[in-house]
Image (spheres, rainbow, N blue to C red):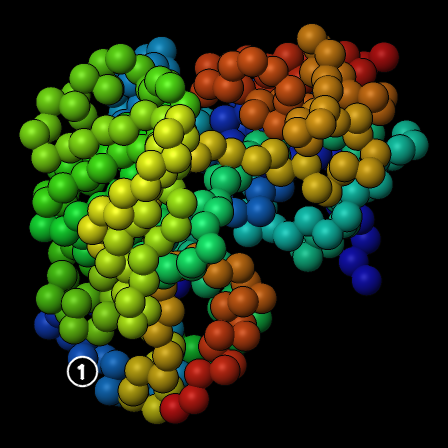
Amino acid sequence: MFTQLTSANFATTLESTKEGVALFYKKLCPHCKNMEKVLEKFSGQRQGISFYSIDIEEEADTAKAFGAERAPTILVIKGGKVAATKAGLMNPKEMAAFYDSAKA
Amino acid sequence: MDAAKQFDTVIIGGGIAGMTAAVYLARANHSCVVLESNITGGLCNSTYTVENFPSYTDINGMELMQKVRDQVDALGVPVEEVCEITSLELNGDTKRVHTDEGVYEAPTIILATGRKPLPLEVPTPSDQVHHCAICDGAPYKGKRVLVVGGGNSAFDESLYLMQLGVAHLTLVEVMPRFFAAEKTQDQLMAYKNVRTMKETRVHDLVVEHNVLTGAVLENTQTGARETIPVDGVFVFLGQLPNSRLFAHSITLDKQGYVLADANMQTNIPGVFSAGDINAKTFRQLTTAAADGTIASLMADRFLRR
């Protein structure tokens, strides 16, 4: 479900994304695995949203540049721009509300 | 509305207790499902290194739980993660579990809901208060952290923070002694930039312009207070039982733990409980797995009666 991104293609992918969610994660982070499942559930309820994942430890500079050093951090992308950023675990209802409240 | 999904046993909670129960039930040819509000693995997922589970000298907690999950998957047991349970009907021959995924029905239920971390109770809130060093530790490289708690989790996660390269770590415990394994205590105290304090509680946090700058510590014996500079706080104060869903029907102790008998039988026939949710003296991976084993064997016996 997730397209894995790196520092090399993150910015360009973001610019070309109409509606999307990026998950900044760490491999050994339980809340990140949890957030993956939340996003899988969220994706089943929504159409037309692109889902990306990016490894905080491997892409540390990009994580820092986008204020995503804490794991997990979610970036909501609307109209090719970051519309909202939030660190920490959310449940599916909170994720839906967070996505909907983010303005392009 | 979709029809209720029928099983022999519904297991609520996908930690080591619930997953062990699933393994035994599946091997006894019973249909069962694991419903988990987060992801399978429970609190063990947050343990950086497990050194007391027979079979591995040391293993990451999430990796160990993934191996148990692989075993559950190989047996074909369905697992619903991020499943929100809204209510339970435990009385009667058919038990019902209402969730955001629909209704599950079974003649037997195993409650393995475990525990959740206790929050730090201080007057001043801060975004720099965390409960998982693996998740939130990285930004504190070269900075000062406070760890609250003196049990295995506190020491284990402190060792992880030290490996990340925090500049200084202060660990405080409210009781007169630390409860972590001696070996883990020795490992942490070998660091020169670690300070440990017993009989000490966190009185408050110091937050300036929304940024944590310090913590006010209080000696529980003398009442003396000291403000130390910290950039982040990691809290491992222990756990609270996840029993709210069934507190109205299952007999609990004063702390909210299930009063099950030695065979994991609760006060309701056909409802068993296993793992950290039970009132007991020791809560370990091995004891939770043992509880899950007994609960599933009792459910098997109940189903065959």
Residue bearing the label numbered 1: A12
In the image, farthest residue toward the top: B262
Q: Residue furthest right?
A: B92
Q: Nearer the viewer, residue B292 or B104?
A: B292
What residue is shown at x 32% (from left), y 57% (from top)?
B206
Residue depicted at x 73% and y 12%: B261
Horizontal and vertical percent position of residue B154: 33, 32
The answer to whether any part of residue B44 appears in the image is no
* Above or below: residue B73 compared with residue B87: above
Among the 4 quarters of the image, the one containing residue B237? top left
Q: Is residue B188 above or below residue B102?
A: above
Rendered residue at 48%/40% (across/down): B117
Q: Amino acid at mark 1?
A: Thr
Q: Is residue B286 left or right of residue B231?
A: right
Instruction: Please tell me how crowded label 1 is: few (under 14), some (14-19), or many (20+) other residues with Cα within 10 Å.
Output: few
Which residue is at the front of the view, B164 or B273? B164
Q: Is residue A28 above or below residue A82?
A: above
Quadrant location of residue B203?
top left
